[in-house]
Every structure is written in structure tokens, then in C-alpha cells.
């Protein structure tokens, strides 16, 4: 009897802490929606107060066009900020899509504040930087789609992935001249 009381006491935590949930792949947002609905039905909105699926934007180029795509920073994980007790633990564990609460064999162990701030810093850094995949390589042949050299093909000599420009050598009056061209004005021929 004494050990049952001790376990319940271990699970009872009225301070807000952040917990990591391992979820079914590709269902991170659905898990959050399910959790919000279940918490609402049980009137526990004051106990579970925040949900996080770390998503960062990435810039890609396809056929010379730029588009932004979302990428999950931590696929298969959702983070929640909540108090913790038997009822909350039960609701989280039994939400469709939740596999387990990470580090919760006997009782859930929360993230440290530093671990959580590291996650937030990664999101901010990647969002500020807009990580992108450069669809070109030096030596590729590209077709210019705009301007006076429209529909001509040239070889890439240099790429500036941060500014989304590439350098090509164009012949003007029989002499090679370096020209910077934005990614969106060229198309890869290779």
C-alpha cells in the first residue's frame, strides 16, 4: 500500500513543465489536435497549456522557381507544457498517435529549461537563415529564361547559395564576361 502512495506522489506535479511525446510518424499535428480535443473534453485546459511541433521553413528551387516548404525539425516528436498527475498522464498516453512519453517508465521526466531553450534557438536560427537546397552545381548547364540572353544556354562557374544567385560566363563580342543571375531566371538543362 505504501509503494502505491509513493508512486502517485511521484506523478503528482503542479508546476508547469515540458514533456516530450514520441508519436507516430507524420501524425505530429494530428496528435496535437487530438490532445487539444481530449483536454477540452476533460476540462484540463489549465493543466496542459502549450503544444509544440518544431517546424522550420526551407527554401527550394524547382525548375527555376523558388518555393518555401515546411520541414519538421524533430519528426516523430511533440512537446507539451503541462502539470502532471495520473489523469493527465493517462490522457496523454491514450491519445491516438501518441506512442509514449519519453523517459516515462515509472513517472514522466520533463525536459530541462536549457533543453527546451536549445530547441527554440534551433527553430529561430533555421527560420532566420531559411535553410535551402541549391538545385545547381558548378559546371551545370542552365537555360536563361529572361532578358536579352533569353533561351540561351551557359555553364555555371560559381554559386552564391546565400543570396540565391549564380555566376555564368556569357560571351559578349567574343570575350567571356561574368554575369550574376538570380536562381529564378534560370532552368537546369542537365
Image (cartoon, helix red, strand yellow):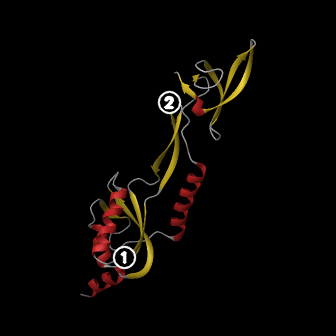
Quadrant housing residue 124:
bottom right
> Quick check: 165 left or right of 30?
right
Q: Is residue 79 above or below residue 5?
A: above
The front one of 136 and 12 is: 136
| Numbered disc total | 2
Label annotation for residue 45: 1
**Identity of the residue drawn at 35% across and 69% down:** 104
Q: Which residue is mark 2?
A: 63
Q: Is residue 33 above or below residue 69?
A: below
Where does the image place residue 103, in percent across and percent down from the top left? 38, 67
**Identity of the residue drawn at 30% across and 68% down:** 37
Quadrant housing residue 13:
bottom left
**How busy is the neighbourhood of tag 2: few (under 14 within 10 Å), some, or many (20 plus)?**
few
The front one of 89 and 143 is: 143
- Disc 2 and disc 1: Cα gap in Å? 46 Å
Where does the image place residue 59, in percent across and percent down from the top left? 53, 43
Where does the image place residue 84, in percent across and percent down from the top left? 37, 77
Quadrant housing residue 31:
bottom left
Q: Is residue 23 above or below residue 174?
A: below
Amino acid at each position: 500500500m505504501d509503494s502505491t502512495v509513493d508512486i502517485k506522489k511521484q506523478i503528482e506535479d503542479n508546476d508547469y513543465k515540458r514533456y516530450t511525446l514520441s508519436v507516430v510518424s507524420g501524425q505530429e499535428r494530428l496528435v496535437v489536435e487530438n490532445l487539444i480535443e481530449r483536454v477540452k473534453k476533460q476540462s484540463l485546459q489549465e493543466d496542459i497549456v502549450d503544444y509544440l511541433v518544431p517546424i522550420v521553413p526551407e527554401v527550394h528551387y524547382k525548375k527555376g522557381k523558388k518555393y518555401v516548404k515546411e520541414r519538421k525539425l524533430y519528426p516523430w516528436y511533440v512537446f507539451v507544457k503541462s502539470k502532471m498527475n495520473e489523469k493527465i498522464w493517462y490522457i496523454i498516453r491514450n491519445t491516438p498517435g501518441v506512442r509514449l512519453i519519453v523517459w516515462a517508465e515509472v513517472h514522466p521526466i520533463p525536459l530541462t529549461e536549457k533543453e527546451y531553450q536549445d530547441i527554440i534557438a534551433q527553430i529561430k536560427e533555421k527560420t532566420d537563415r531559411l535553410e535551402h537546397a541549391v538545385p545547381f552545381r558548378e559546371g551545370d548547364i542552365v537555360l536563361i529564361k529572361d532578358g536579352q540572353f533569353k533561351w540561351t544556354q551557359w555553364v555555371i562557374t560559381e554559386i552564391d547559395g546565400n543570396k540565391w544567385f549564380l555566376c555564368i560566363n556569357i560571351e559578349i563580342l567574343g570575350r567571356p564576361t561574368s554575369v550574376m543571375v538570380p536562381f529564378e531566371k534560370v532552368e537546369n538543362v542537365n
